[in-house]
Image: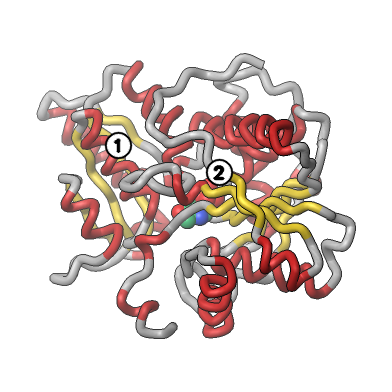
Amino acid sequence: MKMPERIDLANLPTKIEKMDRLSKELDKNIWIKRDDQTGMEVSGNKVRKLQYAVKEALDGGCDHLITCGGIQSNHARATAAVAAKLGMGCTLVLRGEEKEDREGNLFLETLLGAHVEYITAEEYAESRGGIMESIRQELGKEGKKAYILPEGASNGIGSFGYLDAYHEIVEQEKEMGIHFDAIVLTVGSGGTFTGLFVGNRLDEKNRDVVGINISASADHFRNVIAEIVEDMKNYAEIPFSVNPQDVYIIDGYQGLGYAISQDEELQFIKRLARLEGIILDSVYTGKAMYGLVEEIKKGNLDKYENILFIHTGGIFGWTREVRGRV
Ligand SMILES: *Cc1c(COP(=O)(O)O)cnc(C)c1O
């Protein structure tokens, strides 16, 4: 299959490390792919998707990026960094209220020169697409050509970033002389999962790709993923459609919902930090890895010998509020 073109923005390939002490504790081989180290300003999973989406923007002659997300969106921060690097303008439409005290990702975004528009949760749910479109038109009147990226860059073009990552994992398996029976990752807006899922299907389902959703429901994401695959077909020849029933997502670890942490999740993150020297984030990877460990303990993943967890990043999301609880 011929891939669409990309630009280089990330430090690749990212390392795969064995989590020795956790593996010993659970009597299961657990590995971690350090996509939290794709960069510093652009760290995390979103930059892989931006490598494809922003290439499309540049090819279309665009000079401005517009995207959206939660107030601590890692995707918004990575987009702001990429825009600055490429000399493009950047407008971020974020769900939340403007406050004096800008923290974490929000602080970095303004430092990187992005313009932030704050909208309510209701506006975000119902009309963020329209809001971004009207910003695009306003910019057009100023002679600017803006490109709109959806939430998480989880559309067809963005998801090629993780089809790429799948190929990278296969190369690393060869070098390491190991086979991962399962790749486990967080599902937030679905693009990361979709890229890996498509990679695995094209690789004759060499393993299971297992998602753990951190908001909404598994069923919601099964449909989202099938739709993203259809969108990928606008860019490359993908010889299958996805039946949502065939998408493996483990439900039940979204806890209290998006970006709301339960104490057991935070305590798990703290314990893992001390066990492995690895910092997870509280919104995405902390919940997903907590879920993975719980599922192993329950015996639900007994058929897998070697499990690869993708660390998708998120370190800047440790806001004062969550920090105060660990
Ligand atoms: C966005 C994000 C995810 C989820 O990835 P999707 O492609 O949106 O499903 C996981 N982890 C972190 C740290 C993220 O920022």
Image spot of residue 216 (x, y percent): 58, 63
- Residue at left 42%, top 39%? 47
Q: Is residue 150 left or right of residue 248?
A: left
Label 1 sits on residue: 82
- Could you tell me which quadrant the C terminus lies in? bottom left
- Closer to the camera, 311 or 259? 311
SS at mark 1?
helix
- Residue at left 35%, top 16%? 59
SS at mark 2?
loop
Label 2 sits on residue: 15
Marks 2/1: CA–CA distance: 22 Å
Disc 2 residue crowd, few under 14, some 14–19, many 20+, Cα 10 Å: some
> Of circles 2 and 1, which is in front?
2
Is residue 235 in view from this perspective?
yes
- Closer to the camera, 175 or 164? 175
- Residue at left 50%, top 42%? 154
Is residue 225 shown above or below 166? below
Image spot of residue 92 (x, y percent): 27, 48
Q: How many numbered marks, from 0 up?
A: 2
Is residue 206 shown above or below 268? above
Disc 1 residue crowd, few under 14, some 14–19, many 20+, Cα 10 Å: many
Q: Is residue 67 left or right of residue 241?
A: left
Give the residue type that dot 2 points to.
Lys
Query: Can you name the residue that lies furthest to the left here?
Result: 142
Q: Are marks 2 and 1 in contact (CB under 8 Å)?
A: no
